[in-house]
Amino acid sequence: MQPETDEIKSANQKFYDAFGALDIVTMGEIWEHSEAALCIHPGWQPLLGWELIRDSWQGIFDNATLMHFNIQYVNVAVLGDTGWVTCIENISSVLQGRASNFGVMATNIFVRGPAGWTMITHHASPSLS
Amino acid sequence: MQPETDEIKSANQKFYDAFGALDIVTMGEIWEHSEAALCIHPGWQPLLGWELIRDSWQGIFDNATLMHFNIQYVNVAVLGDTGWVTCIENISSVLQGRASNFGVMATNIFVRGPAGWTMITHHASPSLS
C-alpha cells in the first residue's frame, strides 16, 4: 500500500467530518476552488464549479441539525497526483426534525496541490440496500 | 484543453459503444483487469475486481436486446496518467421486451497504461430529472 493511500483516507475523513459538523469553513478548505470541481448530491443534477458547490453545502447545512457518518471503504487508489475513494456513507441524521438512517454510495476524487489533497469530484448516489 | 482530453473522451465513447452494442469482448478491452477495478451499476452495490465486473456486464447484456446511448458531457479532466469524466447517459433501451428512455449519471475514471487508457472506475446512478 502506498503511503499516499493514508493521506487520501485522511482527506476523505476530513470531508466527512466537515459534513457531519455542518462546517462550511472546513468544507471550503477541502474542496478544489476551480471550475473543474464537480459535486453530485444523491439524486441531484451535477454542480460544476466551487461557487455552486459551496452554495449547495450551505443550503444542506442550513437544513440539517445533526449528521453522523460511519464510512465504509470499498476502494482507495492513488496514481501520481490523483487519488480516488469509493465508500459507503452510513448516515444517521436529523433533517427538519425527523431522524433517519440511510446509506449513500460515494466516489470521491482528490488531486494533490501545494496545500495537499483537495476534493475535485464528489459523486454520491442512494444506496438501495 | 489538453490533447489527453480527447483521448479520454474517445475511451469513454468506446465504453458506451461497447455497452450499446452489448459487446463483451470490447468491454473487456476497455476495462482495467485488476482488483482495483470498481463498478457501480445504478442502484447496485459496488463490484470490485474485473471478474465480478465482467460477469455483471455479461448478465446485463444477456437480458438486453437494444441500447442506444446519447452521452452528454458535464466534465472531462486529466491529471498525469489519470483521467475522469462525469456525464449523463441518455439511454433508449429494450429490456425484456419493454422499451424505455431514461437518464443515468456516471463518473468514469481512466488510467493510462501501455495499451492506452483503461477504465478503472464506473459509478453510475439514477438521474431523477
Image (spheres, coloured by chain):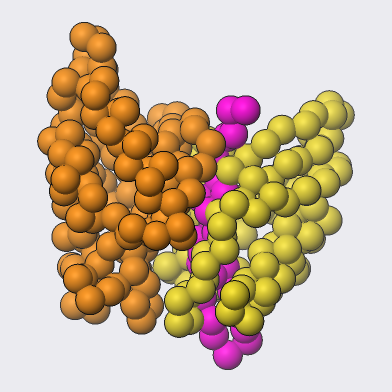
Chain colours: A orange, B yellow
Determine whether, in the image, residue B91 is placed left or right of residue A15.
right
Quarter that holds the C terminus of chain A = top left
Magenta stretch?
A: B106-129
Task: Give the quadrant of residue A91.
Answer: top left
Percent of width and height locating residue A25: 16, 45
Residue B96 percent across, percent down from the top left: 81, 31
| Res B32 → quadrant | bottom right
Could you say where residue B108 lies in the image, as x and y percent from the top left? 55, 59
Q: Nearer the viewer, residue B66 or A69?
A: A69
**Residue A119 shows up from this direction:** no
Q: Is residue A19 above or below residue B53?
A: above
Could you tell me residue B113's position as x and y percent?
Answer: 54, 85
> Was residue A125 drawn as part of the magenta stretch in this picture?
no
Q: Is residue B20 left or right of residue A10?
A: right
Magenta portion: prevailing SS class: strand
- Where residue B63 sits, quadrant-wise, is top right
Residue lying farthest to the bottom in this orientation:
B114
Residue drawn 26% across and 20% down? A63
Outermost residue toward the top? A97
Decide if residue B127 is on the left or right side of residue A4. Answer: right
Q: Is residue A102 visible?
A: yes
> What residue is at 84 percent from the left and 26 percent from the top?
B98
